[in-house]
Image: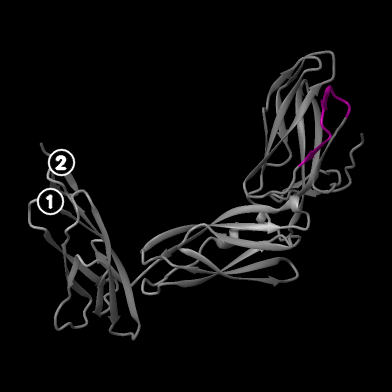
Amino acid sequence: MSISRSLLFSCASCSEVHKPIVSSNGDQVQILSSLDGPLRIKTDQLDMGIVSSLGKRPFSFRVQNSSSETVHVEKVVTSCSCTSIHPAEFELRQNESILVNANIDYSRVSKSKDLISPFGVEVRFNLGENRIQEFYFSGRVKKPFVSPATVNRFAKNVQVGERSKTLQLKFIVDPDAEKFLLVSKDQNLTVKNIRSETNPLERIEVWDCELSPQFHIGEFSYPLEVRAEYPSKDKNEVAQIWVNGRVESDLDYSPRQLLFYLEADKQKTQSETVRVFSDRQRKFRVVKVLPSHPSIVVNTPTAQQARSEHELNVSVDTHAEAGETVQGEIQLMLLAQDSSQTVSATLPVSVVSLDQEEVFLGSGQMRRVR
């Protein structure tokens, strides 16, 4: 079969300009071979399908030795640096065949504005003694139906005093899909609203999500599931993306949680000091403290003045059965001097009631005595 060499081809993955490749046919990969060598491709078409995630996309094809002699392939090279062939060296006896794997790296395909990009690779088999046999692969590469590259960073500087924060997420999506659904896989992230934006180059879906970090300061990463519905139901797609960000606050407290061990036949009341402070030296005062369990008592400073640090004395006195654990929390409501906004923080509290054979050693350790 003759191969047209009148066109130049630009790779969809790395944008390298290659030697001519035959025209594409839908989402199929065509494999054409010059017939002046002993190797044959047993399958003339491979279905690439839709690339559902960025990264390496493998496909396989079978190479057969059609000659009566043993053929030793010394090296397999490709015209595109983003494509690798395995194995790169092999030997075939008469009529013997081998499955060859090709890995195409699409990690840079997002540089293109086109949702569907041309694809093609020229593969050269070096048979030794200056004998080269070439195969040509061509087709179309379809981008992921939703681009995760648009949701890398957001939700920065979410203040701890805001019990929820609405985030606007934008995704470049496949215009052929009829409908998109966004499903949160974590209770700390709620999908509130979905709408579409269009421009001449691409279709964009916009989702408003409400972030409820429960006042956990620091990095967070929540999973979302994106579903695309197409006119043909067998084309429906599902992908998982991750929402990454950081929750920051002007307020912090130490320790991050309270854990009490109450030993049997000993005083049932224990106390600990909690430091609540501003990491930016903002002045504030404690407005209210709400323990969620009657066994938790918090003594707030008297005659409070606005300053950058306060100390709270937390006591517990529980009559739980031996071996039980009482879970509670302390809601701290604070008023900053330079703002009328009241911010909050949550301090988890656990009280473990030991039995008569357990002794608390400190540093979170216990030992059982006989």
Local secondary structure at mark 2: strand
Instruction: Look at 67% across and 62% down and name the residue there.
Output: 180
Residue 45 within the segment the image draws in magenta: yes
Instruction: Look at 12% across and 51% down and name the residue there.
Output: 263
Residue 367 shows which numbered tag?
2
Would you identify the image quadrant in which residue 297 lies? Answer: bottom left
Which residue position holds label 1?
A: 263
On the image, the x and y values in percent for residue 285 come to 23, 80
Is residue 43 found left or right of 223 in the rendered image? Answer: right
Residue 202 shows which numbered tag?
none
The range drawn in magenta is 35-47
On the image, the x and y values in percent for residue 94 come to 80, 14
Is residue 316 found left or right of 236 in the rendered image? Answer: left
325 or 113, which is in the foreground?
Answer: 325
On the image, the x and y values in percent for residue 235 come to 74, 51
Three-letter amino acid code at the position of disc 1: Glu
Instruction: Look at 46% across and 72% down and name the residue there.
Output: 165
Q: Quadrant of the C terminus?
A: top left
102 or 335, which is in the foreground?
Answer: 335
> For the view shown, which residue lies furthest in the right direction?
2
Three-letter amino acid code at the position of disc 2: Arg
Give the alpha-carbon distance from disc 1 to disc 2, as whole Å. Answer: 12 Å
